[in-house]
């Protein structure tokens, strides 16, 4: 016990461990933003979220590979790949919600679990048939140095970029939900569906737009993850589970909660991996989930049920 506490203290006071944990948390936060929007607004737990992330990574990789003649494309081409991925997966998300999920929701929201689970398998197997099982990666030329030094910690440029994008996405969608007409319509639908219908809102369209935004965000995240880590068609399940943990920790439907929950999960996992072993990182994360469900079931920024 004393050894564990000593290792914990050494890890907490080591800037390298803390900073790299937060950077990993930035990845979790970016992918959980879309997940919390769907769960909080539509009331659907999207079990295909990780597979849409995977699809975003492969779409970005394919776009960049099509328009670039080298294995190290310019950062501008990489951004183009992200934009193509965002639009393509976002449109797919709109029609998934509009044509499939909305229809099933009219019978039972519980059945949407089975639907999104099945859609995830279809997306995964389709990617396996088209792209194969070989792990891929995207290697753009990131402006500036490949690593940064801060408080004695070495920070890879790719992970720092993902972290910055996660913070930017949080700010953009917080403003979007609070200040835009569509954002206010989404919040109205999440708070009282019947009242929103009475004032003339097309609930099916609002839900579909929410799903499209979620899919677009997670597609961009997938492309960014492909820049820092290798990816393959079977990667989606792990990221879906991570999103679930982050949303529970941060609070259902909270964009700020997704950011804080992601950072917290990344930090907890990295500290635990440093103390024990990286092989039990998932177990550490789900232990944190159980603790949050017992101590603060509504999450850090979630609202208590009436």
Image (cartoon, helix red, strand yellow):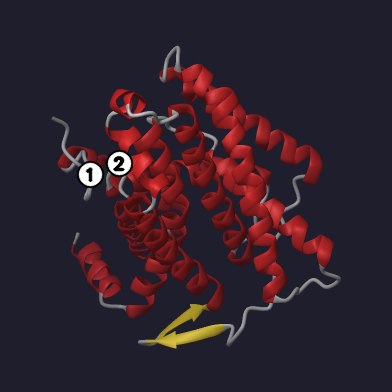
Q: Examine the image and state in which quarter residue 247 appears.
A: top left
Q: Residues within 10 Å of mark 2 (few under 14, many from 20)?
A: many
In the image, taking residue 91 as reference, residue 255 lies left or right, namely: left
Q: Which residue: 27% across, 34% down?
A: 191
Q: Is residue 272 above or below residue 95?
A: below
Residue farthest toward the front in the current orientation of the protein: 200
Q: Percent x, y for residue 157?
A: 54, 78
SS type, badge 2: loop
Does residue 105 sit above or below 167 in this rendering?
above
Q: Is residue 120 visible?
A: no
Residue 81 location, quadrant: bottom right
Q: Which residue is mark 1?
A: 302
Q: Which mark is residue 252?
A: 2
Residue 42 sits above or below residue 291 on the image: above
Residue 190 falls in which quadrant of the image? Answer: top left
Question: Which quadrant of the figure contains the N terminus?
Answer: bottom left
Residue 29 appears anywhere in the view? yes
Q: Is residue 184 above or below residue 68?
A: above
Residue drawn where x is 68% and y is 56% of the image: 84
Residue at the image point whose x is 54% and y is 42% from the top:
212
Please state which of residues 168 and 131 is positioned toward the viewer in this rendering: 168
Q: In this rendering, would 254 be left or right of 23?
A: left
Instruction: Give the CA distance from mark 1 to mark 2.
Output: 5 Å
**Along the polypeptide, which appears first: circle 1 or circle 2?**
2
Q: On the rendered structure, is 232 left or right of 194?
A: right
Q: Are marks 1 and 2 in contact (CB under 8 Å)?
A: yes
Image location (x, y in percent) of residue 228: 59, 66
Image quarter in which the C terminus is found: top left
Label 1 crowd (10 A; few <14 / some 14-19 / many >=20) = some
């Amino acid at each position: 016990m004393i050894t564990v506490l000593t290792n914990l203290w050494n890890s907490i006071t080591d800037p390298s461990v803390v900073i790299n944990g937060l950077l990993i948390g930035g990845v979790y936060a970016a992918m959980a933003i879309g997940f919390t929007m769907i769960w909080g607004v539509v009331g659907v737990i999207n079990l295909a979220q990780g597979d849409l992330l995977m699809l975003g990574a492969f779409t970005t990789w394919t776009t960049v590979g099509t328009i670039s003649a080298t294995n190290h494309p310019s950062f501008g081409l990489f951004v183009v790949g992200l934009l193509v991925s965002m639009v393509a997966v976002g449109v797919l998300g709109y029609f998934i919600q509009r044509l499939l999920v909305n229809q099933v929701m009219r019978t039972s929201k519980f059945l949407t679990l089975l639907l999104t689970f099945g859609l995830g398998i279809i997306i995964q197997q389709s990617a396996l048939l088209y792209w194969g099982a070989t792990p891929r990666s995207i290697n753009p030329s990131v402006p500036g140095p490949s690593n940064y030094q801060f408080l004695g910690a070495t920070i890879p440029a790719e992970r720092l970029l993902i972290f910055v994008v996660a913070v930017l996405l949080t700010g953009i969608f917080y403003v979007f939900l609070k200040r835009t007409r569509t954002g206010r319509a989404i919040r109205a639908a999440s708070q009282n569906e019947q009242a929103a219908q009475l004032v003339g809102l097309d609930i099916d369209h609002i839900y579909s737009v929410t799903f499209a935004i979620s899919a677009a965000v997670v597609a961009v995240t997938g492309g960014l993850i492909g820049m820092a880590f290798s990816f393959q068609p079977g990667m989606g399940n792990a990221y879906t589970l991570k999103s679930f943990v982050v949303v529970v920790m941060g609070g259902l439907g909270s964009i700020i909660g997704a950011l804080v929950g992601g950072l917290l999960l990344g930090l907890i996992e990295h500290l635990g991996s440093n103390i024990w072993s990286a092989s039990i990182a998932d177990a550490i994360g789900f232990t944190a989930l159980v603790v949050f469900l017992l101590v603060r079931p509504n999450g850090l920024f979630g609202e208590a049920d009436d």
